[in-house]
Amino acid sequence: MAQAAAVLQPESHNENMSIGLDGDYRKDMAESLTEILAGTYGMIIKNHVFHWNVVGPLFKPLHELTEEHYQALFEAADIIAERIRALGHLAPESLKAIADFAPDAKSVKHMTAESMVKDLIRDHEKCVGDMRKAAGKAGEASDLVTEDMLTARLTFHEKALWMLRATVAD
Ligand SMILES: [Fe+2]
């Protein structure tokens, strides 16, 4: 018997998915998580660029910290994308959507190690703000799994912020 081909489409209607989270909520949260995923990918790339190009007395600590962070962020990207799928929506799949992950074009030629750290601090703070807002929405909707995932992500970003601040403290 011929098997029907699987069709990739979002399961946004409640009748297709009964997990106690309504379709409007799942759609809204999938959009929030897609933005969070974009921020996470942007930081993976930026941490790599700084890992390669940092110079000066902070070279070793920043070279090592950025490596630790891009590896952790890469694992996180998979977890975030898979949560979007579990909520019934598609993980970003178009080239256009993936191109949006790239950070703003910027030259690192004249960046000092301190300015790289400050740049990373700004990105982590933006992620923390977006995640806290999404975690609040997840909590209100009793979406414990998304809330738990975002709590774990917030723990990582807040620790990263502490380490980055400590690296450039006077
Ligand atoms: Fe490396």
Image (cartoon, rainbow, N blue to C red):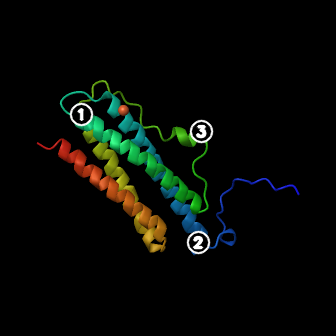
Which residue is drawn at the image coordinates 58% and 71% (left, top)?
22
Q: Quadrant of ligand 1?
A: top left
Secondary structure state at the residue bearing disc 1 = helix
| Chain-order first, disc 3 or disc 2 | 2
> What is the crowding at mark 1: few (fewer than 14 residues within 10 Å), some, or many (at least 20)?
few
Measured in 3D between alpha carbons, the distance from the residue under mark 2 to the one under mark 1, in whole angstroms, is 49 Å
Secondary structure state at the residue bearing disc 2 = loop
Secondary structure state at the residue bearing disc 3 = helix
Q: How many marks?
A: 3
Q: Identify which amino acid the numbered label 3 is placed on.
A: Leu
Residue tagged 1: 60
The answer to whether mark 1 is within 8 Å of ligand 1 is: no
In the displayed orientation, state which residue is furthest to the left: 170
Measured in 3D between alpha carbons, the distance from the residue under mark 3 to the one under mark 1, in whole angstroms, is 35 Å
The correct choice, above or below, for 168 with respect to 130 in the image is: above
| Chain-order first, disc 2 or disc 1 | 2
Which residue is drawn at the image coordinates 47% and 65% (left, top)?
146
> What is the crowding at mark 2: few (fewer than 14 residues within 10 Å), some, or many (at least 20)?
some
Residue tagged 3: 95
Q: Please identify the quarter of the rendering in which residue 62 is found.
A: top left
Q: Identify which amino acid the numbered label 2 is placed on.
A: Asp
Measured in 3D between alpha carbons, the distance from the residue under mark 3 to the one under mark 2, in whole angstroms, is 29 Å
The answer to whether mark 3 is within 8 Å of ligand 1 is: no
Given this view, does label 3 or label 1 mark the residue nearer the observer? 1
Residue 150 appearing in the image: yes
| Chain-order first, disc 3 or disc 1 | 1
Q: Give residue 145's position: percent from left, percent from top.
A: 48, 67
